[in-house]
Image: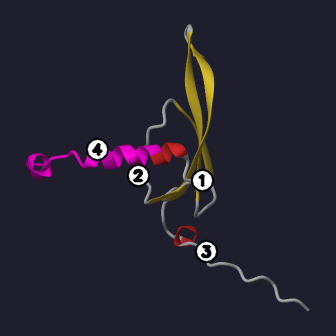
Amino acid sequence: MPDPPQMALLPIARLAAYQRPFTYVGIDYFGPFMVAVGRRSEKRWGVIFTCLTTRAVHIELACSLDTRGTPREIYSDNGTNFKAAEKIICDKAQTINFNAVQPAFNDIK
């Protein structure tokens, strides 16, 4: 009788008990779709959020490709929109004068 195939270990995100839903999330965008807004057309994207722990699914309509929320970890198919955002963030982070910005954050209570 053949041996059943060995299963890989599940990632921690799939076993996160007692965490609120969508703490560990997979995200994928689809579209764009052209929608009528008054007399003009605008692009809209669909966003699928998948909770990696509970496997719940949430679908939204996005007006832009901006980020939202504060999940602990995000898993993605490494789409070009995420690669482009990473490049922009890294480039902008190198231009920040942290010595000039730090006093403003020291006063936050």
Element under disc 2: loop
Q: Which is more toward the observer, 36 or 18?
A: 36
Q: Residue 50 carries which label?
A: 1
Q: Which of marks 1 and 4 is in front?
A: 4
Q: Is residue 21 visible?
A: no
| Among the 4 quarters of the image, the one containing residue 45 | top right
Kindly identify the amino acid type of the residue bearing the numbered disc 2: Thr
C-alpha gap between disc 1 and disc 3 = 16 Å
x%, y% of residue 48? Answer: 60, 45
Give neighbour class at mark 1: few <14, some 14-19, many 20+ (Cα, 10 Å). many
Give neighbour class at mark 3: few <14, some 14-19, many 20+ (Cα, 10 Å). few
Q: Residue 92 carries which label?
A: 4
Q: Residue 108 carries which label?
A: none
x 14%, y 47%: residue: 97
x 49%, y 69%: residue: 18
Element under disc 1: strand
Q: Nearer the viewer, mark 4 or mark 2?
A: 4
Q: Does the magenta stretch include residue 95?
A: yes
C-alpha gap between disc 3 and disc 2 = 23 Å
Horizontal side of residue 2 vs 33, given as left or right: right
Give neighbour class at mark 2: few <14, some 14-19, many 20+ (Cα, 10 Å). few
